[in-house]
Amino acid sequence: MMNEVVIVGQIAKISEMYQNCNGSKETEIVLKVQRNMLISGGKHEYDFIPVILWEAIAKMMIDVCTIGSMIGIKGRINYNQAEKFNIICEKISFMDKYSFTGQDG
């Protein structure tokens, strides 16, 4: 069996980095992902997907991304009964040409 997802979207929300109960640093982002189908008026709908990033990946993302930055992530689906479904990020790709210059895109 395989639990692997690849998602490309814009960052809609970035939470502050915190230390979890296991002592690891993590942060949560929400990715805004465009759906393929159009709704009335020719507009797109979006899904908002929570993504958890740990340690070095979280720090790197916080250092180079802002709200609206386009990123791709590879990870796995996680479900915690006390919480909800989310994606655990294992790899991140910065797709926004402005990510490394600090400019808004």
Image (cartoon, rainbow, N blue to C red):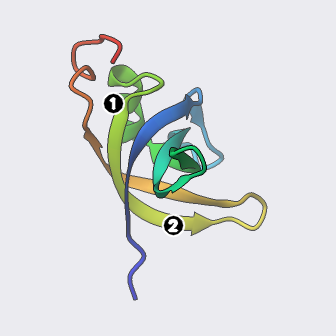
Q: Which residue is mark 1?
A: 60
Q: Which residue is mark 2?
A: 77
Counting from the top left corner in percent of width and height, residue 24 is at 51, 43
- Amino acid type at image mark 1: Met
Residue at 44% over, 65% down: 76
Residue projecting furthest to the bottom: 1
Residue at 57% over, 31% down: 13
Counting from the top left corner in percent of width and height, residue 81 is at 75, 67
Residue at 42% over, 76% down: 3
Q: Secondary structure at mark 2?
A: strand
Counting from the top left corner in percent of width and height, residue 26 is at 52, 40
Residue at 37% over, 25% down: 65
Counting labels gives 2
Q: Which one is in front in this view, the residue at disc 2 or the one at disc 1?
A: 2
Disc on the earlier residue, 2 or 1: 1
Separation of marks 2 and 1 at Cα, in angstroms: 21 Å
Residue 61, relative to residue 35: is it above or below?
Answer: above
Residue projecting furthest to the right: 82
Residue 4, relative to residue 73: is it above or below?
Answer: below
Counting from the top left corner in percent of width and height, residue 39 is at 58, 52
Side (left or right) of 35 relative to 61 = right
- Amino acid type at image mark 2: Ile
Q: Residues within 10 Å of mark 2 (few under 14, many from 20)?
A: few
